[in-house]
């Protein structure tokens, strides 16, 4: 029996890391709902603080403080990660608010739209030229937003805010990717966000009251664990990115919103009137067009590389 080649093993492990990351991101919906009666504002504040603590532990265990301090001496990296932190804060806060207020399906729509937003940002920010199929996907997504806004009677601001905040966040992370690893990046982001989290906790304490330690040991552990469930999928995602081609990463990213959608519809029983099904159907059609184009472009690229 012929043993698997190193490249095959590399790709297999990458696929396991990628699926694990996106499954964890998908089930975060249930995790945050289980933290009731904690409000979204308190959840995100503890998520920031405990993520920073967890990252500090990881930097210590992996002995990575020295390269991290090198990043601290770079004003460009610091301010770039501050911007990334602001964007991921908007994403986290919007997502948790959507989760605990019964808008999981709309949050799922945001992450379904995100790949198309990423393509659109490539045109606007990086002046990339889109292929015809990519323009079709962008156009279909715009039609879907109009259908959802008019037919459902409410503008899908949660979905668009999630899609664009994560789209811009991904753009920034792509630019600093060779310089800043996943743990150092999350550490810098949460360092910038910690003052905001502290202010947020003070406001929560003066209004609804802090719930940490008030609802039993398991609730406290789960609330503190928000930092772990934030960092672990990011580590898996970073490991997958180093092992898998972009085509694979592109397909696996649909796992997260699919899980969120299934949870919203079949577990939480959120409303799905016909106009919402139509809107989602158009988005899924756009993703099919985008995926087929992505596969075709990858095959063409490999063919050109072989000829060269």
Image (cartoon, rainbow, N blue to C red):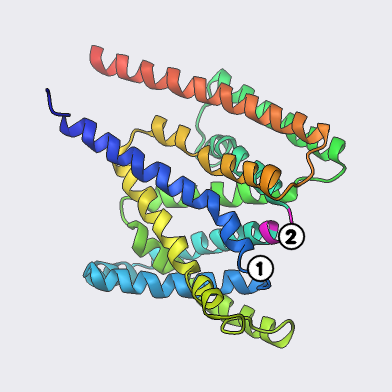
Q: Residue at x 64, y 83 (%)?
A: 210
Point out residue 81 in the picture as x, y percentages from the top left corner: 45, 62
10 Å crowding of disc 1: few (<14), some (14-19), many (20+) = many
Note whether residue 207 is visible: yes
Residue on which disc 2 sits: 101
- Which residue is located at x 87 percent, y 42 percent? 153
Along the line of sight, which residue is nearer the eye, 31 or 103?
31
Q: Main secondary structure of the magenta part?
A: helix
Secondary structure under tag 1 reads helix
Name above or below for residue 57 compared with residue 153. below
- Compare marks 1 and 2 and give the one earlier in the sequence: 1
- Residue under the image location 46 percent in, 62 percent down: 229
Foreground: 61 or 64?
Answer: 61
Q: Secondary structure at mark 2?
A: loop
Q: Residue furthest bottom?
A: 206
Is residue 35 magenta-colored? Answer: no
The span shown in magenta is: 98-102
Residue at 84% from the left image edge and 46% from the top image edge: 154
Q: Residue furthest top?
A: 307
Q: In the rendered image, which quarter contains the N terminus?
A: top left
Q: Is residue 193 visible?
A: no
Residue 200: quarter of image: bottom right
Q: Is residue 73 left or right of residue 122?
A: left
Q: Is residue 170 left or right of residue 202?
A: left
Q: Which residue is mark 1?
A: 40
- Locate residue 157, reporting x and y percent: 74, 49
Q: CA distance from mark 1 to mark 2?
A: 9 Å
Q: Are marks 1 and 2 in contact (CB under 8 Å)?
A: yes
Instruction: Where is residue 20? Give x, y as percent.
Output: 41, 47
């Amino acid at each position: 029996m012929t043993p698997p080649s190193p490249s095959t093993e590399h790709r297999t492990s990458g696929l396991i890391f990628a699926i694990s990351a996106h499954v964890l991101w998908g089930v975060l919906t249930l995790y945050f709902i289980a933290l009731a009666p904690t409000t979204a504002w308190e959840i995100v504040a503890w998520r920031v603080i405990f993520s920073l603590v967890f990252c500090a532990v990881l930097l210590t265990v992996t002995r990575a403080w020295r390269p991290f301090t090198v990043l601290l001496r770079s004003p460009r990296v610091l301010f770039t990660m501050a911007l990334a932190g602001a964007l991921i804060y908007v994403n986290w806060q919007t997502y948790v608010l959507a989760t605990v207020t019964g808008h999981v399906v709309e949050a799922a729509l945001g992450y379904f739209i995100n790949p198309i937003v990423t393509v659109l940002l490539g045109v606007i920010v990086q002046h990339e030229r889109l292929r015809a199929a990519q323009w079709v996907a962008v156009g279909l997504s715009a039609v879907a937003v109009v259908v959802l806004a008019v037919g459902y009677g409410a503008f899908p601001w949660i979905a668009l805010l999630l899609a664009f905040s994560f789209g811009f966040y991904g753009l920034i992370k792509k630019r600093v990717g060779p310089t800043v690893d996943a743990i150092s990046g999350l550490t810098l982001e949460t360092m910038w966000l910690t003052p905001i989290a502290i202010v947020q906790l003070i406001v929560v304490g003066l209004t609804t009251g802090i719930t940490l330690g008030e609802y039993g040991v398991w609730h406290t552990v789960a609330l503190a664990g928000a930092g772990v469930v934030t960092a672990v999928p990011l580590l898996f995602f970073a490991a997958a990115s180093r092992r898998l081609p972009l085509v694979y990463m592109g397909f696996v990213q649909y796992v997260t919103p699919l899980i969120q959608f299934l949870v919203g519809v079949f577990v939480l029983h959120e409303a799905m009137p016909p106009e919402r099904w139509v809107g989602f159907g158009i988005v899924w059609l756009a993703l099919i067009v985008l995926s087929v184009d992505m596969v075709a472009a990858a095959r063409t690229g490999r063919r050109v590389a072989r000829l060269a």
